[in-house]
Amino acid sequence: MTTVATPDELRRGLADQLTDDGAISSPRRYRVFATVPREAFVPAFTVRTPEGLHSYRDGEPGWPSTAYSDVSLLTQTDAHSTTTSSSSQTSVMARMLWRP
């Protein structure tokens, strides 16, 4: 049987990864990334993959684990399929928020 990680587990896993990679450098910042529910801000998104673009919606297989991967999430496109809004790659957000 396959176990599906909960959003809380995915959040902590991403925070662990960001800490290991050096994007998060303090317990306080870790708590922020381990507790703020990214999925609340991205109910639908598209990601770039080696095979092309893949879209996800809340409740679909792969949606939670992809929402908590360290990639940018494309959240809006215009009539010409040009990305006009996104949720930045999480490691980039962490580094931008707490630059020395």
Image (cartoon, grey):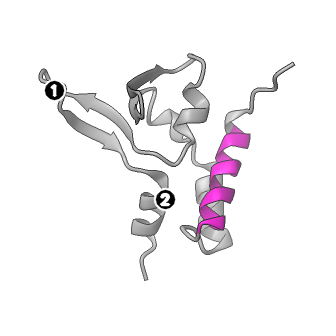
User: Does 75 sit left or right of 9 as displayed?
Assistant: left
What distance separates the C-alpha of mark 2 from that of mark 1? 26 Å
Q: Which residue is tagged 2?
A: 91
Kind of element beneath mark 2: helix
| Type of the residue with mark 1 | Asp
Q: Which of the image's four quarters has the N terminus?
A: top right
Residue 49 location in percent, x, y? Answer: 42, 34
Residue 33 location in percent, x, y? Answer: 59, 55
Q: Which of the image's four quarters has the C terminus?
A: bottom left
- The disc placed on residue 7 is none
Task: Give the vertical position of 16 relative to 4 (above or below).
Answer: below
Alpha-carbon neighbours of circle 2 within 10 Å: few (<14), some, or many (≥20)?
A: many
User: For the stretch drawn in magenta, what is the main secondary structure?
Assistant: helix
Residue positioned 55% across, 43% down in the render: 69
**Closer-to-camera residue (31/47):** 47
Residue 99 position by quadrant? bottom left
Q: Is residue 12 magenta?
A: yes
Range of magenta residues: 8-21
Alpha-carbon neighbours of circle 1 within 10 Å: few (<14), some, or many (≥20)?
A: few
- The disc placed on residue 78 is 1
User: Does 100 sit left or right of 29 as displayed?
Assistant: left
| Type of the residue with mark 2 | Ser
User: Does 7 sit left or right of 72 as displayed?
Assistant: right
Task: Give the vertical position of 87 relative to 83 (above or below).
Answer: below
Residue positioned 59% across, 30% down in the render: 64
Q: How many marks?
A: 2
Residue 28 position by quadrant? bottom right
**Closer-to-camera residue (99/91):** 91
Instruction: Pick whichever of labels 2 and 1 is earlier in the sequence.
Output: 1
Residue positioned 52% across, 41% down in the render: 38
**Quick one: which residue is furthest to the right in this view?**
1
Q: Is residue 10 magenta?
A: yes
